[in-house]
Image: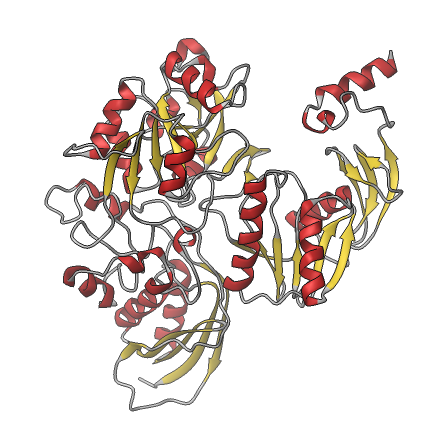
C-alpha cells in the first residue's frame, strides 16, 4: 500500500454539530491516521492512507454527515506524508477569532427519544435529554466560543457519568455542551399562579391533568414560554382568548404525533417531512371537513380553512403529549402584541392573569426565539416566519456577491428581521416582531448586539428603509453616529423584490426583472406613501412602472394593519 496524505478543508455549518467525532469515527472505519480540528474557516482534516481509502473517506464525509451539519464545500490538497502519525486524533481547536456559524435549536433526535422512553435508561423521563444531534443551541448561548461556560448550562456541572460521555469521541455526546442527566442537570416543577410550588411527584403529568380539566398552563419551552390548553374544549379556548386579548387570530396547536395531525388535517409528504424535521416548525395545513376530523374547538381558527400544527420538539413536550389523548393549543406566552416571556419571574408577573398554573424549569433561556412557521406552496415548503430551528441561518448569496461583507441590514418596522452580510453569506435573524412595542424594540436592539458579537461582525455599512420614522432606521442612525459607518437607504418595495431575487438565486449580473410587490405601505422615492408597486428592478436600482391608484387612507394608520379598508376604498372608487 502506498501511503498518501491530504489536507481536507470542510466549509459550512460544521462546528458544534458533532462533525469532528463523525470524522474520527470515519477515520477508524477506513483505517486512516491523522487529525481533525476546528479553526476559523470550518473544519480542517489532515489524513493519511491509500488513494482508495481517502476517496472513500471523502465520499463518506458527505453521505454520513451529522444531521445538523451542512457542508458547503470540501477542498482537498496533497501534503507531505508524516510516517510518525500512527493514530487519528481530535486536536485542540485553533482560536482565530472567527466563528463559522451558530447552530439553531434542534428537535429531539430518535436516539434521545428512545432513551427518554426506555425505563432501563438513566435518562428515562428526563425532560432535558439531548446530544450533539439535537437540543438547545442558539437559545442558550451567551457568547462565543460555543463552550458550556458561555451558555446557560454553565450553572450545571456534569456528573462523572455525563463527563465520561462528553470526553469520549466515540460517544454521540462528545462535546455536547448542553449534556445533562437527572443527577446533574436542570429540573422541572409546577407552580400555581401565585408562584407557589405544588408538591406533586410528576410535574409534567400533573400539568397534563390540569389541561384535561380545562385549565390554562404556562409552559417554559426552548425559546420562550407557551400558553397551553385543551384544543377540543370550547370553554378553555374561549377563556384563553379572553384573558390574552387575542380575539380572532388563529392559535397554533401541538399534536402527539403525525397520526394525530392527520386526524385533523390533510398532510402531504413534504408537510410531514417539515413537521418531523429538526426545525419542527408550525406547519399551516388544510383542515379536514368536520365529519372526517378529530373534534376541535371552532374558536381555534375562526373562519379559516387551515390550521397550524407542530409536533413535540423537546423532551418536555414529548413527555407532556404522551400523557394527553388530544392536541393542545400551544400559543406564545405573552400578552397580546408583546414579546414572548423567557424569564421565570417575568412570566409570573405578566402571565399570572392568563395562566392557572406554570410548568417551570431552571435552565435559563438566554435568547428569545418564537416558533418558526412554514407552509407548502407550489410544491415547496416556504418559510413564513423564521424562528426556533431556523435561525440563525447562514445563506449563501447568489453569483456576483462573493465579497459582500460588513453590511448590516436593519429591517423594517413591522414583522422585523435583520440580516448581516459576511464574506458572501447572508446571516438571517429570527422574527423580531413589531418594533413599535417598547419590549420588542429593546429585544431587537439586544439581538443586534448579540449577532454582531456572535459572528464577529464589524459593520462598515448600515442599510435602512427610506421611511424616516421607522425605529429600525433610528436605531441605525444611533449606531452610525457612534461608529461612523456608511448609511444607505432602500425603498421598501424594491427591497422586497431584491429579496425575492435572492431567494431564487438570481445573480448580480443577471439583469433586470419586472417585480410586483403587493405589500403594505412604503415610503416612496417621491416622499409619498407607495403600495402595490410594479417595478423594473435589479439589486441596485429600480424604476416605477405602475402602481395602484393612490386613495385616501380610511381610518388613517389603521389602514396599514386592516387591508379591508384599502380594498373598500378602491372598490368605492371603481363604482
Residue at horizontal 36 percent and vertical 75 percent from the top: 36
Residue lying furthest left: 120
Q: Residue 416 appears at what percent x and percent y?
A: 62, 43
Instruction: Specify whether 132 is left or right of 298.
Output: left
Q: Residue at x 70, y 50 (%)?
A: 474
| Rendering coords of residue 3 (x, y %) | 34, 85
Choose between 504 and 315: the one closer to the eye.
315
Q: Quadrant of the N terminus?
A: bottom left
Q: In front: 137, or 25? A: 137
Q: Is residue 183 above or below residue 405?
A: above
Q: Is residue 381 left or right of residue 475?
A: left
**Is 136 on the left or on the right of 157, as rendered?**
right
Please tell me how many numbered marks the rendered image carries: 0
Q: Determine the residue positioned at 55% across, 39% down.
A: 385
Where in the figure is residue 45, as x and y percent of width and height? 40, 76
**Where's residue 393, x and y in %?**
52, 53
Residue 141 sits in quarter: bottom left
Query: Is the C terminus in the top left, top right, bottom left or bottom right quadrant?
Result: top right
Quadrant of the image occupied by residue 531: top right
Judging depth in this view, the residue of 114 and 217 nearest the camera is 217
Q: Can residue 400 be seen?
A: no
Amino acid at each position: 500500500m502506498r501511503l498518501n496524505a491530504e489536507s481536507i478543508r470542510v466549509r459550512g455549518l460544521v462546528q458544534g454539530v458533532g462533525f469532528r467525532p463523525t470524522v474520527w469515527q470515519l477515520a477508524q472505519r477506513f483505517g486512516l491516521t491523522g487529525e481533525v480540528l476546528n479553526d476559523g474557516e470550518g473544519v480542517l482534516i489532515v489524513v493519511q492512507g491509500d488513494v482508495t481509502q481517502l476517496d472513500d473517506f471523502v465520499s463518506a464525509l458527505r453521505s454520513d454527515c451529522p444531521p445538523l451539519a451542512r457542508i458547503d464545500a470540501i477542498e482537498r490538497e496533497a501534503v507531505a506524508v508524516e510516517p510518525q502519525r500512527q493514530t487519528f486524533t481530535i486536536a485542540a481547536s485553533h482560536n482565530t477569532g472567527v466563528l463559522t456559524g451558530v447552530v439553531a435549536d434542534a428537535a429531539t433526535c430518535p436516539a434521545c427519544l428512545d432513551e427518554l422512553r426506555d425505563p432501563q435508561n438513566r435518562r428515562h423521563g428526563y425532560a432535558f435529554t439531548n446530544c450533539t444531534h439535537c437540543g438547545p443551541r442558539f437559545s442558550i448561548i451567551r457568547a462565543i466560543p460555543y463552550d458550556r461556560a458561555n451558555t446557560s448550562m454553565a450553572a450545571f456541572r456534569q456528573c462523572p457519568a455525563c463527563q465520561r460521555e462528553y470526553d469520549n469521541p466515540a460517544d454521540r455526546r462528545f462535546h455536547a455542551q448542553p449534556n445533562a442527566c437527572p443527577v446533574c442537570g436542570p429540573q422541572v416543577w409546577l407552580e400555581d399562579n401565585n408562584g407557589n410550588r405544588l408538591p406533586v411527584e410528576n410535574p409534567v403529568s400533573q400539568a397534563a391533568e390540569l389541561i384535561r380539566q380545562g385549565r390554562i398552563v404556562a409552559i417554559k419551552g426552548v425559546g420562550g414560554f407557551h400558553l397551553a390548553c385543551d384544543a377540543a374544549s370550547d370553554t378553555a379556548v374561549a377563556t384563553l382568548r379572553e384573558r390574552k386579548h387575542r380575539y380572532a387570530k388563529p392559535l397554533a396547536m401541538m399534536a402527539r404525533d403525525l397520526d394525530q395531525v392527520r386526524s385533523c388535517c390533510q398532510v402531504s409528504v413534504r408537510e410531514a417531512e417539515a413537521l418531523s424535521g429538526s426545525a419542527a416548525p408550525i406547519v399551516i395545513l388544510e383542515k379536514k371537513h368536520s365529519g372526517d376530523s378529530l373534534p376541535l374547538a371552532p374558536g381555534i381558527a375562526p373562519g379559516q380553512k387551515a390550521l397550524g400544527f407542530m409536533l413535540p420538539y423537546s423532551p418536555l413536550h414529548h413527555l407532556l403529549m404522551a400523557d394527553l389523548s388530544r392536541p393542545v393549543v400551544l400559543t406564545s406566552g405573552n400578552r397580546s402584541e408583546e414579546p414572548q416571556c423567557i424569564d421565570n419571574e417575568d412570566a409570573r408577573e405578566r402571565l399570572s392573569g392568563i395562566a392557572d398554573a406554570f410548568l417551570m424549569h431552571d435552565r435559563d433561556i438566554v435568547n428569545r426565539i418564537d416558533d418558526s412557521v412554514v407552509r407548502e406552496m407550489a410544491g415547496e415548503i416556504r418559510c413564513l416566519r423564521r424562528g426556533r430551528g431556523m435561525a440563525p441561518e447562514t445563506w449563501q448569496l447568489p453569483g456576483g456577491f462573493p465579497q459582500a461583507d460588513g453590511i448590516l441590514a436593519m429591517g423594517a418596522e413591522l414583522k422585523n428581521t435583520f440580516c448581516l452580510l459576511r464574506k458572501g453569506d447572508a446571516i438571517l435573524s429570527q422574527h423580531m416582531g413589531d418594533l413599535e412595542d417598547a419590549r420588542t424594540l429593546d429585544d431587537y436592539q439586544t439581538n443586534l448586539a448579540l449577532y454582531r458579537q456572535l459572528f464577529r461582525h464589524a459593520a462598515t455599512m448600515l442599510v435602512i428603509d427610506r421611511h424616516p420614522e421607522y425605529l429600525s432606521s433610528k436605531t441605525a442612525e444611533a449606531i452610525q453616529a457612534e461608529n461612523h459607518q456608511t448609511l444607505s437607504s432602500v425603498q421598501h418595495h424594491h427591497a422586497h423584490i431584491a429579496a425575492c431575487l435572492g431567494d431564487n438565486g438570481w445573480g448580480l449580473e443577471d439583469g433586470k426583472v419586472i417585480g410586483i410587490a403587493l405589500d403594505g405601505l412604503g415610503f416612496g422615492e417621491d416622499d409619498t406613501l407607495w403600495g402595490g408597486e410594479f417595478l423594473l428592478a435589479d439589486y441596485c436600482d429600480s424604476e416605477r412602472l405602475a402602481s395602484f391608484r393612490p386613495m385616501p387612507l380610511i381610518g388613517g394608520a389603521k389602514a396599514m394593519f386592516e387591508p379591508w379598508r384599502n380594498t373598500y376604498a378602491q372598490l368605492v372608487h371603481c363604482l
